Structure formats: structure tokens, C-alpha cells
Image (cartoon, rainbow, N blue to C red):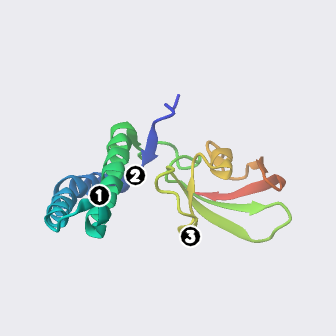
Amino acid sequence: MINAKETFVSQEKFDEMVKELEHLKTVRRTEIAKNLEYARSLGDLSENAEYQEARDLQAATEERVKKLEELVKYTKIFTDGKKKSEISFNSKVSIKKEGDPTAHEYTIVGSEEADMRVKKLSHVSPLGAALMGKKKGDIFTFETPSGKQTYTIEKVS
């Protein structure tokens, strides 16, 4: 059973999140502290645009640190442990919509890595969830805002 807070990512994405978190906690926080100190030295804080900007940047950075800490804490790294014939994390799939001769290819990823511009489909999206566990040749239907869609799985790798 998947915990609601759990996020699934590749090792590469996990390493990227850890690296960003470390950068924010060390380099970025130091830069912001220097900016705040400089802005304070300019005098009246109530009408000091530099100070307000530095405070806003600090708030945004701390929010990102908090989010990354939560993600890293609950992230599970997926591996290619399952059979290649069954769709799971990191599977590359080719599917055809009923009545459409064109096949569409996607890679199934965790929600943090999803990016439709590069055909990375989240496992929790309606289509991604419908694909999980299926095999080549399976026909499946799932609900979309424009109604039910039926697809055939052409290839799984």
C-alpha cells in the first residue's frame, strides 16, 4: 500500500533534489543573509524595497527547503525490479487510442518527474494509473473530462 505522502522518483531525480536542498541550505541561505544585512544597513525598513525583496526571497527559499525536506523524507526510489512485460515505474509504453492510427509513447514516472513536454507521464495521472500493471496487447478504458477513452497497449519496454 502506498502512503499518501510517499513520492516515487528515479535515483537521478532523488540525487537532484538532495543536491538542490543542500545548495539552498548552505549557499542560498548565506547569500540571502548577506542581502538582508545590506538592506538593513540602508536605514528605514518600512520603505526599504531591497529589504522587502530580500525578505520575500528568504520566505520563498525557506518554503522550498521545507518542501524538499518533506519530499526527501518520504521519497521512495524506484528500480527496474519488475518484469519488463508489465508496466511499472520507468516503463516505456506505446499506446494507441481506439480509432486513431497514431501510437503515442510515454515513460511512466513519479509525480515529481512528470513532464508531458518530454512524454514523462505520472503514475498517479488518470492515464498513468490506468496503465500501471498492464501488459502488451491489453485494451483498457479510463475516464477523462471528455468521457471514457479506450486504448490498446502496443509496446512495453
Circle 1 residues within 10 Å: few <14, some 14–19, many ≥20: some
What whole-number distance in Å separates the C-alpha atoms at marks 3 and 2? 18 Å
Q: Nearer the viewer, residue 100 or 46?
A: 46
Which amino acid, by three-letter code, is at mark 3? Arg
Q: Examine the image and state in which quarter residue 95 appears.
A: bottom right
Residue 103: percent from left, percent from top: 71, 68
What whole-number distance in Å separates the C-alpha atoms at marks 3 and 1? 34 Å
Which amino acid, by three-letter code, is at mark 2? Ser
Numbered label attached to residue 26: none
Could you say whether the residue bearing mark 3 is in a helix, strand or loop? Answer: helix
Residue 42: percent from left, percent from top: 17, 68
Vertical order, 64 against 76 (above or below): below
The residue that label 2 is drawn on is 10
Q: Please tell me which residue is depicted at 33% across the width and 43% down the height of the picture.
A: 72
Residue 6: percent from left, percent from top: 45, 37
Q: Are marks 1 and 2 in contact (CB under 8 Å)?
A: no
Numbered label attached to residue 55: 1
Residue 15: percent from left, percent from top: 29, 54
Numbered label attached to residue 117: 3
Which circle, 3 or 2, is nearer the viewer?
3
Q: Please tell me which residue is depicted at 22% across the width and 63% down the height of the picture.
A: 44
Vertical order, 54 against 76 (above or below): below
Q: Nearer the viewer, residue 156 or 126?
A: 126
Circle 3 residues within 10 Å: few <14, some 14–19, many ≥20: few
| Relative horizontal placement of residue 96, taking residue 5 as reference (left or right) | right
